[in-house]
Image (cartoon, rainbow, N blue to C red):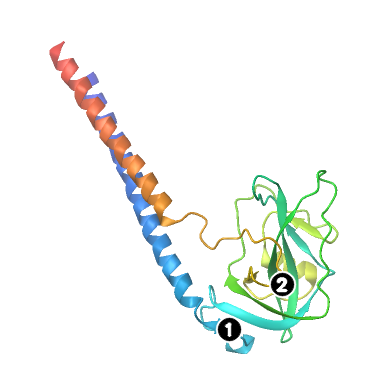
Amino acid sequence: MRTIAFILFSIAVVSLLLKLSWWQLSRADEKKQLQSQIQDRQQMRVVDLAQLPVEPLWHSITLEGEFDNQHPILLDNQLFRGRPGYHLYLPFISQQQQVLVNVGWIAAPLYREILPKLPQLNGRKVISGVIAPAQQLLQFKPDNTDEQWPLRVQNIELDRLALQLQQPLLPWVIQISASSPIALTQTWQPVVMGPKKHYGYAIQWFLLAIAVVVISLLWLRKEREV
């Protein structure tokens, strides 16, 4: 009876490890497709919001307009070279529409209660960047909606931010080009974990499955000899 239980347990563990390995392979394939899609779409530039493609994400974009310096948004918990900081988002008004622009990373002061000194981007500007989805991470409690500007948030929730701005926002953000003269330090990446890492994890799970099989066979062999 003990042997049967051990065999069933080993089969379950090996099945789980192989399933995890297969899942990592599928994730790697998804990342490869996404990278290819991003590269293809960035070759096509949008210059008129009235002529946005049906699926605008990952297209390059160039717009002329003005930043709203009165309503800066600081995306919290953004590390750069081990130093805590924020991604600075500013509303950008172009062609009578408003979109959030990630200007880049800015270091956090030593004390949490002190906010960083923010740049003032006055006058009409021409910005270039990439149309990207708003960052959404796991969040255990909602942001404090009573904060004063600049807002310090854990996620870029466009619907909620539009209510606080009292202006509609386009359903995506612009990640400003690193070559822009107004860009801060650029740490944003369209694909956080590339396919190579997923392949590495897939190999690890597969090797663990082989190790469990070998250990199980050795244990069964020892049981028969007893």
Whichever of callouts 2 and 1 sits on the residue coming sooner in the sequence is: 1
Residue 188 in the image: x percent, y percent?
Answer: 60, 60
Kindly indicate the quadrant of the structure image that contains residue 119. Answer: bottom right
Residue 1 appears anywhere in the view = no
Q: Which mark is residue 160?
A: none
Residue 186 in the image: x percent, y percent?
Answer: 64, 61
Q: Residue at x 79, y 70 (%)?
A: 165
Q: Secondary structure at mark 2?
A: loop
Q: Residue at x 70, y 68 (%)?
A: 183
Is 145 situated left or right of 204 in this image? right
Q: Which mark is residue 181?
A: 2
> Are there few (<14), some (14-19), or many (20+) residues within 10 Å of tag 2?
few
Residue 16 in the image: x percent, y percent?
Answer: 33, 40
Three-letter amino acid code of the residue under disc 1: Val
Three-letter amino acid code of the residue under disc 2: Pro
What is the total number of numbered labels drawn onto the structure image? 2
Q: Residue at x 81, y 72 (%)?
A: 121
Q: Nearer the viewer, residue 161 or 29?
A: 29
The residue at which mark 1 appears reads as: 46
Is 99 situated left or right of 150 in this image? left
**Marks 2 and 1, how far apart in space?**
20 Å
User: Which quadrant is home to the N terminus?
Assistant: top left
Kindly indicate the quadrant of the structure image that contains residue 88. Answer: bottom right
Q: Secondary structure at mark 1?
A: strand
| On screen, residue 158 above or below 74 | below
